[in-house]
Image (tube, rainbow, N blue to C red):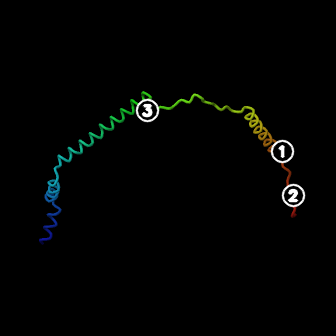
Amino acid sequence: MGNNKKIKSFFSKGSKKKRINEIRNGFNMSKIWNIMLASFAFAVVIIVVVNMYLFFQISSGEIFLVEQDASVSVKTINRTLMQETIDSFDEKARDFESLKSTSISRVIDPSL
């Protein structure tokens, strides 16, 4: 009978609050919350400052400086080679259409 009372008291609401209070008494909860709040506020301030720095550097064009090369060369297409290639594809297309239109002679089975 004594065990039943211990089990009931273990699961009762009062004992749960008592256990939570015993855990909380080991720590100063307001101090922990203040430390967490200060840490997050500090992190937010650092992030805002870094982002503002990057924004102003990018908007002024100072952060991504690229040296301009004076000797810029532009390769152009060899137009004669391009025209020859187009002509060869056109010829292949005509050959294909002519093969489709002509009837293929039937191959007789030599084993017969």
Question: What residue is pinned by disc 3?
Answer: 63
Q: Is residue 74 left or right of residue 99?
A: left
Check disc 3 and give the amino acid type.
Ile
Q: Quadrant of residue 80?
A: top right
Which residue is drawn at the image coordinates 79% and 39% (left, top)? 91
Q: Is residue 75 left or right of residue 23?
A: right
In the picture, the quarter occupied by the N terminus is: bottom left
Q: Residues within 10 Å of mark 2 (few under 14, many from 20)?
A: few
Please state which of the two labelled residues, at mark 1 or mark 3, is closer to the viewer: 3
Q: CA distance from mark 1 to mark 3?
A: 68 Å
Residue 11: x %, y % from top left: 17, 62
Q: Residues within 10 Å of mark 1 (few under 14, many from 20)?
A: few
Q: What is the number of callouts on the image?
A: 3
- Label 1 sits on residue: 102
In the displayed structure, 83 sits above or below 34; it is: above
Contact? badges 1 and 2 (CB < 8 Å): no
Which residue is labeled 2 in the image?
Answer: 108
Nearer-the-camera pick, 23 or 109: 23
Element under disc 3: loop
**Residue 96 location in percent, x, y?**
78, 43
Quadrant placement of the C terminus: bottom right
Percent of width and height locating residue 72: 60, 30
Which comes sooner in the sequence, label 1 or label 2? 1
Q: Residues within 10 Å of mark 3 (few under 14, many from 20)?
A: few
Q: Residue at x 44, y 29 (%)?
A: 61
Q: Give the residue type that dot 2 points to.
A: Ile
